[in-house]
Image: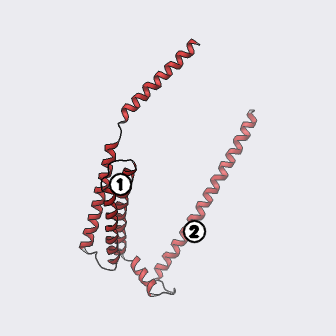
Amino acid sequence: MTLAHIEQLAVVLAAVALLTTLGVLGIAVVRLRRRWRQRHRLLSIARRGLAGWPTSRVTEGVAATVGSPSWWLVQRDRHAMWRSVAAAQRAVSVAARADAPVGDLPTLARQLKHAANGVDAALRASIGERRVPRDVTADRTHIVSAAADIRVAALASLQAMRVDVQPVVSAISVEVAALTAGIQAARFTA
């Protein structure tokens, strides 16, 4: 290829890259604009207090629930609980797949999920109240703590099964050096 062909190819590639970038940016702008319009519409509805919209008791109840700070707090607590339970289950699953000794951790993780379902139902039922009952909050805290314990146990089991990397790396570097020296020696004798 000549220098002119290379320059022409570079110009074409730059144009394709520019057009692709512009296309991606255009799509992003359209999506952001759509989201902004949707949020603006929802905010204007919230400011008007649903005036002019056909409402039912369900609609008013949903608006009152989502607008309540206690609803948001309960949602935060529920999501934190489920994140911890999922992390525990994931750690146990990974440890079991790696043939690490897990004992009864899989059964305990399932039982913890079942218990979390009950606590989650109690949390959802307490949304309309001023405060979440103390026993429900205590149960949620116990679930999160137990999930952390299960996760730590599964990770410790995996850590105990881990092979020391240093001897393997050392053996590989010795073998590579020997192979390289053998190839060099074969070149000089040929």
Contact, mark 1 vs mark 2 (Cβ under 8 Å): no
* Residue furthest out toward the top: 189
The count of marks equals: 2
Image coordinates of residue 101 in percent, x first then y, are 32, 49
Q: Which image quadrant for residue 173?
A: top left
**Residue at 57% across, 66% down:** 33
147 displayed left or right of 14 = left
Residue 112, percent from left and from top? 31, 64
Callout 1 environment at 10 Å: few (<14), some (14 to 19), or many (20+)?
many
Could you tell me which quadrant the N terminus lies in?
top right
Query: Residue at coordinates 54% horizontally, 72% vertically from top-left?
Result: 38
Q: Is residue 172 above or below residue 9?
A: above
Q: Please, what is the three-letter code of the amino acid marked with disc 1?
A: Val
Identify the amino acid type marked 2: Arg
Residue drawn at 51 percent across, 19 percent down: 182
Residue ID for mark 1: 92
Q: Which residue is mark 2?
A: 34
Instruction: Mark 1 vs mark 2: give the one in front.
Output: 1
Give me the disc on residue 126: none
**SS at mark 1?**
helix
Q: Secondary structure at mark 2?
A: helix
Mark 2 burial class by Cα count in 10 Å: few <14, some 14-19, many 20+: few
